[in-house]
Amino acid sequence: MMKKIAVTLRPYNRVPFAYQKLKICRNCRHFTVLGERDCMSCGKASALQSVEKKAAGIVRRDHWLTGLVWLLLSLIGLLFSSSSLQTVLVIAAGAAVAALLWTLQKRLTPALRRMQLQKMFQQYRYELASGLAIDHQAAIRVFQEGDKPRTYEMLREIGSLVHNDQLKLEQIMLLQTFQLRKDMDLMIEPLLMDSFNTDLVSYIGEIAKIRRDLIKENTFRYVLLHEMRILSMPSGEAILAAVAGAAVRKDRYMTMYPYLLTRYARFLPKDRFLRLFKYAKSARSGPLYDEVMRIYEEKYKWEPDFQNT
Amino acid sequence: MVTYVVTILLVVFAGIKVFHYRYQMKQAPSPKQLSRLVLSTLKRGQSDHE
């Protein structure tokens, strides 16, 4: 068995929308999710800026141009006014236009920025795709240099935008070389694949032991879908029991996955089974209740913890 | 005369800007649509590469 290494991973920076991770080079328009300031493509220092900042800059420039045109017209009008009536007319018109434009710009700036982003992504779609491909190659180079934690961090960032099984598998394979700890910033849902994969299942089994809170609906669905194949794995039954233990965490999951619990309740540790017992007792009937009562009679009938429920 | 022309130009300019902003507002994608655009662009880029 491969020796696992103790690593420290940097926390994953979660954003509301995946595109917010993108940066663009001011010089060569190269896109990336990696790198802080210097562009990996053209090498220009401090050239990277977030796409949102770039879009905001374009919108701000447009606002300034609008203001400049307004100022120019107003000044020309004032310069050529030959009576106080004309002066008042220009000032009134100028003030009304300024108020209208200022109000509109203030209200519409978020929408205008999103329009700019859309234009950017459509206009530079080749640079976007090639940028992420270059990022992936950079991660592979780091892996070849032997820095596995950094490689995983890079793949994790790329994986926020590129959703393919190859990338997921690369992350899982790296995670399997690490000693996983409770305090690490781990994830499951973004790594779930459509097809069955033994490394993914092993990873799920490990996560079910140390971070039950990460096991959610999609993971339960995956495990149930491939249950037979998981059972054919050497420690498949233990993995399914661990996932069943994670289901006991919430009443909602116990309601949604009674058949998973019925099949693996026997393998649950005492504390998990106690929680399941309390839930099943409230149900009073059904296959889960029957199985839980059977196990209770066999193993826990004389346990004080179970008498007090 | 110039003042009146400039005043009219100011109003026309404001009108053009208002219509331009209203058009942009209708076309503006939501953040979710932007995310989907990026993801689909990258997915297409991958399949082209393959």
Image (cartoon, helix red, strand yellow):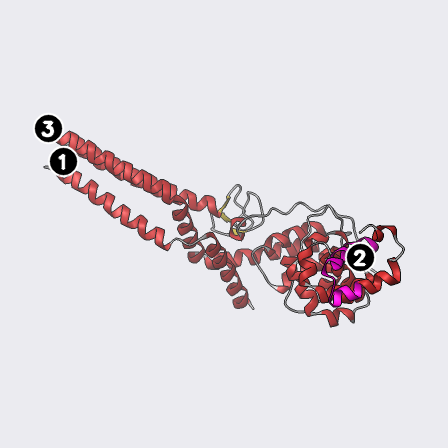
The single residue placed furthest to the front in the displayed view is A284
Q: First in sequence: mark 3 or mark 2?
A: 3
Which chain does the numbered disc 1 sit on?
Answer: B
What type is the residue that disc 2 sits on?
A: Phe
Highlighted magenta segment, given as a residue range: A270-292
Secondary element under disc 1, as helix, strand or loop, is helix
Residue A294 lies, in percent from the top left, at 83, 65
Q: Nearer the viewer, residue A66 or A25?
A: A66
Q: Secondary structure at mark 2?
A: helix
Give the class, few, some or many, for how many residues have Cα within 10 Å of label 1's Cα (few <14, many ≥20): many
Q: Kindly indicate the quadrant of the structure image that contains residue A11.
A: top right
Residue A283 on the magenta span: yes
Tell me which residue sits at (71%, 64%) in the image: A258
Q: Which residue is mark 3?
A: A83
Q: Which residue is mark 1?
A: B3
Find disc 2 in the rendering and name its residue: A273
Is A285 part of what is drawn in magenta?
Answer: yes
Q: Is residue A194 left or right of residue A174?
A: left
Chain to which the residue tagged by mark 2 belongs: A
Amino acid at pointer 3: Ser
Of labels 3 and 2, the one closer to you: 2
